[in-house]
Image: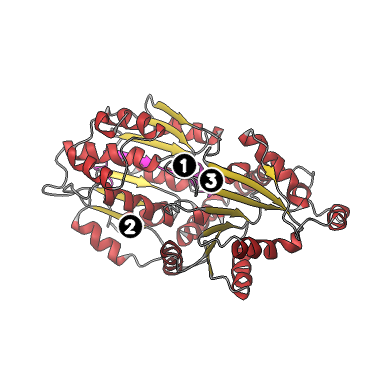
Amino acid sequence: MTFEKLGLCKEILRAVHEQGYSEPTPVQAQAIPVVLKGHDIMAAAQTGTGKTAGFTLPILQLLQKEHAGHGHRPIRVLVVTPTRELAAQIGESVATYGKYLPMRSAVIFGGVGAQPQITKLRRGVDVLIATPGRLLDLVGQKAADLSNVEILVLDEADRMLDMGFIHDIRKVMALLPQNRQTLLFSATFSDDIKRLANGILRSPKLVEVARNETVSLINQVVHPVGKSHKRALLAHLISNQNWKQVLVFTRTKHGANRLTEQLGKDGIQAAAIHGNKSQTARTKALAGFKKGEIRVLVATDIAARGLDIDQLPHVVNYELPNVPEDYVHRIGRTGRAGRTGEAMSLVCHDEMKLLVAIERLINKQIAKIEVPGFVPDPAEARAQHASGDGAGRGHNGRGNGARSSGGQRRSRNQSSRNRNRSGNQQSRAGSSSSRRRRSQ
């Protein structure tokens, strides 16, 4: 199938072909016709499958048919995303594929001054891409009017729920017209996602492509290594194999900062990107990485959502994620749009349970290759085991690393119920919402 057969106008097709694409990906082939027919959709697709264009292209087509861009410009399409980087990436996609259409779009998120965003909104935009906190802030300032929205897109809905944005999402939903088209995209269909979908979608069509499966073009390898030798192994791989561009994942912001400093001491240009970094610093680091000025970009999971780096060759899991699904999102930064890529995981003894959970999720045994000079010391593994420094024990006290995230969520849920009984839910929720908006 070609894009021409999907019924897209010549202006959109021209922009698509300029990007070097002639055939839609499976998720695009499924989603585009459904959206064009006006249906709500509930779509699950792994990262790197082209899902952003899967909703961007048909939305632009629908706006074009209704002669968008003439006269007064109310916000007709609202795209809500969990992170700044993802919002920026979607904004770039809208601008790229809509370059030959008479439309305006805007991207708004926290971490930067609001006034330029307010000015742009007052000039009128057809498509607004936003993170929840800044969106509600500008609505509260009467700078954004959502009463004319015709199409709502919730992208990375699972991540928004994980980040605690459910209350903000409900507030946004209350500001929208009841008669609208809603598109929900999520990497997974958890019970929470299904409950959200049941409340906002009308007879949705299901689009599901490669759910919980890793991209087949990605070569996945595990390098067993002692915990204390991870940094040296990473520096060795980068230097010895002459990697020019590598995205490295850590579990924590502090770990990302520390690794970046250590790589710098090894003579490897690196930068960190995470929630504590200012938007200016994050944008600068990402731009330098894309241009090749920065060799290594060290990121946390949340900050990396939405990173779209053309032809990224290498992804490294410096530490395995606590949630197996995040592994799929991480390695999906490479091997995008039909290209090949490599994903390496540096795994120490106390992460083996996490690795087992990942392999169970993707239904595949990942090749284990020891690197000469960095073979794990059995004595170190025994010492970690004896001290109880295991991935499972460290996270939920039962030696079950695969369920650590679930245990944490249950603990947080119990705490939430206790707060509800104390009668202080409203004040605490308001404070939490404020903190989330600042973090966006």
Residue found at the very far left of the displayed protein: 71
Q: CA distance from mark 3 to mark 2?
A: 30 Å
Look at the image and say whether residue 156 sits in the magenta stretch.
yes
Q: Is residue 136 visible?
A: no
* Crowdedness near tag 3: few (<14), some (14–19) or many (≥20) residues, C-alpha within 10 Å: many
Give the image quarter of residue 220: top right
* Crowdedness near tag 1: few (<14), some (14–19) or many (≥20) residues, C-alpha within 10 Å: many
Which amino acid type is shown beneath numbered disc 2? Leu
Q: CA distance from mark 1 to mark 3?
A: 14 Å
Left or right: 235 in relation to 137: right
From the image, state whether disc 1 or disc 3 is nearer to you.
3
- From what the image shows, is residue 258 above or below residue 340? below
Residue at horizontal 50%, vertical 49%? 334
Q: CA distance from mark 2 to mark 1?
A: 21 Å
- Residue position marked by numbered label 2 in the rendering: 138
Which amino acid type is shown beneath numbered disc 1? Ala
- From what the image shows, is residue 268 above or below residue 384? below
- For the residue pair 92 and 415, the one nearer the viewer reads as 92
Please tell me which of labels 3 and 2 falls first in the chain.
Answer: 2
Q: Is residue 42 visible?
A: yes
- From what the image shows, is residue 336 above or below residue 277? above
- For the residue pair 435 and 324, the one nearer the viewer reads as 324
Give the image quarter of residue 265: bottom right
Image coords of residue 103 (percent x, y): 19, 49
Q: Which mark is residue 249?
A: none
Image coords of residue 423 (percent x, y): 59, 49
- Residue position marked by numbered label 3 in the rendering: 329
- From what the image shows, is residue 311 above or below residue 228? above
Please tell me which of labels 2 and 1 falls first in the chain.
Answer: 2
- Residue position marked by numbered label 1 in the rendering: 157
